[in-house]
Amino acid sequence: MGWRRTVEIRRAGGDVGYAYVVGTFDTKGTELSYVAELITAAGVAARTVDLAPTGGRSEADVPAAEVAACHPDGAEAVFTGDRGSAVAAMTVAFGRYLAGRGDVDGVIGLGGSGGTALITPAMRALPVGVPKVMVSTVASGDTSRYVEGSDITMVHSVTDVAGLNRISRRVLGNAAHALAGACAHPVPVSDDRPALGLTMFGVTTPCVNAVTERLEDRFDCLVFHATGTGGKAMEKLVDDRLVTGVLDISTTEVCDLIAGGVLSAGEDRLDAIARTRVPYVGSCGALDMVNFGAPDTVPQRYSDRNLYPHNPQITLMRTTAEECERIASFIAGKLNACDGPVRFLLPEGGVSALDSPGQPFHDPRADEVLFSTLEREVEQTTDRRVLRSPHHINDPEFAAELVAVFDEIGDAPREGS
């Protein structure tokens, strides 16, 4: 990977990359300097960057004023004297600063809740594969809002990031050496096959496995678990142009967005497809279910619904016809924004392993509302089509149809290209 080299192994053209050590030097300068020294001692060039929203003097290689100047409204938009607005503006400025650098071999940040929120958006914007380590006081809880679909490594600081002691030296040292090792020893990628993104849920596994088996000789198949973060991760790779096609077989994350489940990928699910015009084949995988935790976590308003205990920690709820209509409308709106080649297949035999005759989520009426709404609301063109299939989503014949349709649009010229 050409964007990672050690000090001794320069990049093509003689350029040297750096491990960026970032944080607020007005409060964490000692710790940041300690990390930078360890990285340098490991043979990797380090560059320190001050993100202090106060803009005071520091010993960092890149002063806060230089970063703040990257804000669209200039440094004065950052150094307002109000900490809340200053931190928010510095977050924007740092994102623009880091995105404008061509010498980023890796990034390590230190911070509490505020510093973590300041640093991680810029990390997330970097391509997947660029080493990213965030040492944080909030890394032992729910880190999804900091990591989202990226590959940030969160390290719990254990003690506060407030001075060096017998604990912090070890934790910070381990994190520094982890980043230095990743920068100094890039993993070679020798697979010349183009990459495909596929979404899978437990109840659509037979379909995705069958599709993968048919495609793996020609494509590097990247399968994402449709748990909210899975959809975000796949679309992050789409935005980074690391995926050349998508087989979005399991769009179930939309159910959780619409009905308030725990595995939503957010309102921007499918937006990366529209932005990149990547060839896209989608389907209704697991649109029959909403995910909650253990049975006692299911909202009271759903107590009389068709609930299925997937395991002791996951309870599934069958989507109703009304919810299926809203789900279909959401997907249709997203597909209508796509100018690239799009096909969306409707498996009339059932959308999951639980949706077939004799299974607990079999509901042909709800499925038909889902299908007919998609057919009605998707604005169909030569490039954007909704196709019915008589098969169940896990039937081998349906997998074959998905592959055939993908081969058709993957090789077809795009309008406007």
Image: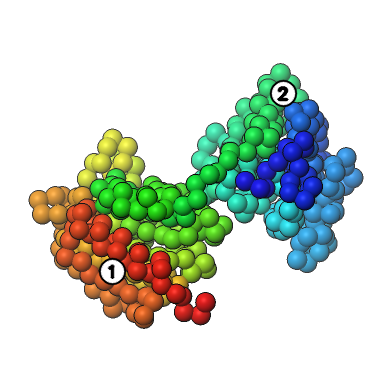
Secondary structure under badge 2?
Answer: helix
262 lies above or below 296: below
- Which residue is nearer to you in this view: 228 or 163? 228
Q: Name the residue under label 2.
A: 169
181 lies above or below 5: above
Which scheme is used to colour this image of the protein?
rainbow
Q: Residue farthest to the right?
A: 57
Residue 91: % across, % down: 70, 54
Q: Name the residue under label 1.
A: 325
Quadrant in the picture for residue 248: bottom left
Q: Residue 352 carries which label?
A: none
Q: Which amino acid does label 1 sit on?
A: Glu
Q: Which residue is drawn at 46% across and 79% down?
A: 415
Secondary structure under badge 1?
Answer: helix
In this rendering, position of residue 398 left or right of residue 253: left
- Which residue is nearer to you in this view: 321 or 273? 273
- Which residue is nearer to you in this view: 89 or 245? 245
